[in-house]
Amino acid sequence: MLTAAYAILFYAATLLLAGGLAYKVWQYAKTPAPLKIPTTPAPLSLPGVALRMGREVALFESLFRSNKWTWIFGWMFHFALLLVLLRHLRYFTEPPWTWVVLLQPFGLYASYAMLAGLLGLWLRRVAIERIRYITGPSDHLMLLLLCGIAVSGFAMRYVDRVDIVALKAFVLGLMYFDWQPLPADLMLLIHLGLVAALMAVFPFSKLLHAPGIFFSPTRNQADDAREKRHLAPWAARLESTGE
Amino acid sequence: MADYQIPELKEYTEPPRIAEGAMGHLSTYPAAPQHQEALGFPGELVEGWHDKAIEKFDELLGRSRSLRVYLDACVRCGACTDKCHYFLGTGDPKNMPVARQDLMRKVYRRHFTLAGKWLPWLVGAADLTEEVLDDWYNYFHQCSQCRRCSVYCPYGIDTAEISMAAREIMDHIGKGQKYCNEIIAKVHKIGNNLGLPEPALANTLEGLEEDIEEETGVQVRLPLDVEGAEVMLVAPSADFFAEPHVDGLIGYAKVFHQAGVSWTISSYASEAANFAMFIGSYEQMHEVAQRIRKAALDLGVRRIVVGECGHAWRVAYSFWNTLAGPFDFLDPAYPVPQHVCEFTYDLIQKGALKLDKSANDHMTLTFHDSCNVARASRMGDRPGGQFEIPRAIIKACCNNFVDMPDDTIRDATFCCGGGGGLLTDDLLELRVKGAQPRMQALKQVADEHGVTHMASICAICKSQFAKVMPDYGFDMDSVVSLHQLVSNAIVLGGQAEAAAGTEEETEETAAAGQAGP
């Protein structure tokens, strides 16, 4: 019963995440950018744009210029989250890939950094007047969700250890449509429930900043307006009737 | 006289405490029915405006990727909150870029997202009520579309894109702004923002020729509608009469004269400005830009050079090729269009101009990077040329140059406070307060380095500074045109004479290039 509920929960969450994201990406991709609007100085060519985007995604370059505290907490959280996610890959492959095994201790440290980053970001939302003004209920809820995932993860390691062999069997069972019993452990159920919730809200929330950045015209356009004529399809139609 | 306080200039820029509603009273004059209708917009707020606004909103979401992505992507991290000069100058929280965007985003959420339809309270979604519409009108006309926020946003969210879309929606339901729409109608009808007809223009240019000859003894021409000229100059119309703009125009004329290139102004396209950008209307912007194309074709020129005007250079550099291209009928050996600074800089590089720097010795200069030039265009063939080329020209023309603090120049530059269609007296309070960050930076170099004058390459910046600088204790004529400095320094004379000065000049230019801060 519990196993079935969680299995269905994860299938549903995965579908929402994948389907929702695919829909948003398709929507962004098909919406034309009618004018060249890179924030300059901008790279003159595509490789330059890739480099700029790479720095933006990997290092949060613009945020670094903007505010060092937000950058420290934000970058720490995101990079740590990446390591933690990679660490969790061990539940998805048998045997785990070597690099995932090697990554395990780093993933563990990263989980502390992740929580620290989240708390720092949360503190800003409360302590700084300007940020408080722009913060809404959903912003707090998102932080609560992420902190909940982190804390329940810690609890399984330090307070109430989970049978991870059984857990792995459950996860692999999900992947190969051969359901295995899920350990009925409260912290695990909370942890997995929150993760499923995060997956499900991803395409409907501000988490869309993740695909969004790649489609941001101020960042992904090359500065070549004089050399190459840029024309959106709807604007081209306007042109043929306008002249 | 003013019923508001002029902000204090402090030693450091620190974000103000938030003062809710501080600028809520300031509403720019609405367009009269005739201003609206001249652009094909409804004359007044239409029946069923709400549904029509949402319909237009939907259309724009399908037309503009930036709008779509930027309304989704914001995480409210706060990176932009202390970056807008209007927030820094007024403390009104709705002048923080994210909060300004949220005025539109909350309606987007309500109508175009599941979360906003089902759980509006959770995600801050709201209906487009009359109150919200009034907020749109007030606060999207308190954004100068300078893009400073977009530099600092981790996703590059550009509030200018949002405010342009909001203005476009408002125009389509009959809630336009007088200043912009009246001006755009004048351009369609007469060819420039000021409504200067051809005879007045001819008269003005003739007067300037006489002035130059009187002062220098040299006949420098300012030709109008000359068919077959090599270069068509498209300058902001303020250059034809306002101070210090006109001194810049004289500077361009002298440069063309020395270059020995034939050039002309067009009375049909006697305006570089394209205020249609400010109202976010692609169609209007297209129509205005088409005038330039037509003028260039009719006159049979080979090159187009654009005068000192910030947003005009953005439209010209970034949009003309899209709106009025392809320019395959022009000389491919030169960039299309070319900024007058690029033109002058090339001549300086070649040693073709004789410049007497001492002519500007009575001034210590700094340079105000205009927002649209800095963050939405380029000069030269390298990124950042828009910062280097104007400075190189100033240094070639002046002995005394000092930059303002790093976080207030180049792509971090502060808007003058009057851009984006806000250069109107009914928004004077906003303009004065929004100038505070720039004035503070200027005061710092004035106090520490004895800076006396600030050069600019934007008609809006020049007009705005001339107007608001006295409020901050600077003379109104302490803002100068960049080509005014060239005009002062340039030594007029025959080609032979200019060529003789070549070697010495190249050395000087090179030295000036290295003397950066």
Image (tube, grey):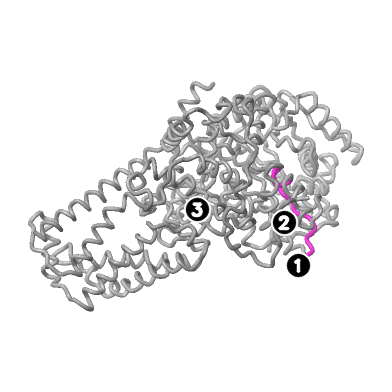
**Going 64% across and 34% down the picture, which residue do you hit?**
B178
Residue identified by numbered label 3? B98
The earlier-in-sequence mark between 1 and 2 is 2
Q: Where on the picture, by quarter, is residue A10?
A: bottom left
Residue identified by numbered label 1? B448
Q: Nearer the viewer, residue B182 or A140?
A: A140
Secondary structure beneath dot 1 equals helix
The chain carrying label 1 is: B
In the rendered image, the vertical position of residue B191 relative to residue B16, given as above or below: above
The chain carrying label 3 is: B
Q: Could you tell me the amino acid type at mark 1?
A: Glu
Residue identified by numbered label 2? B6
The earlier-in-sequence mark between 2 and 3 is 2
Crowding at dot 3, Cα within 10 Å, few <14 / some 14-19 / many 20+, comes out as many
Label 3 to label 1: alpha-carbon separation: 35 Å
Number of residue marks = 3
Span of residues in magenta: B448-462
Q: Would residue B458 be counted in the magenta stretch?
A: yes
Pointers 1 and 2 within a single chain: yes
**A209 left or right of B94?**
left
Q: Nearer the viewer, residue B448 or B213?
A: B448
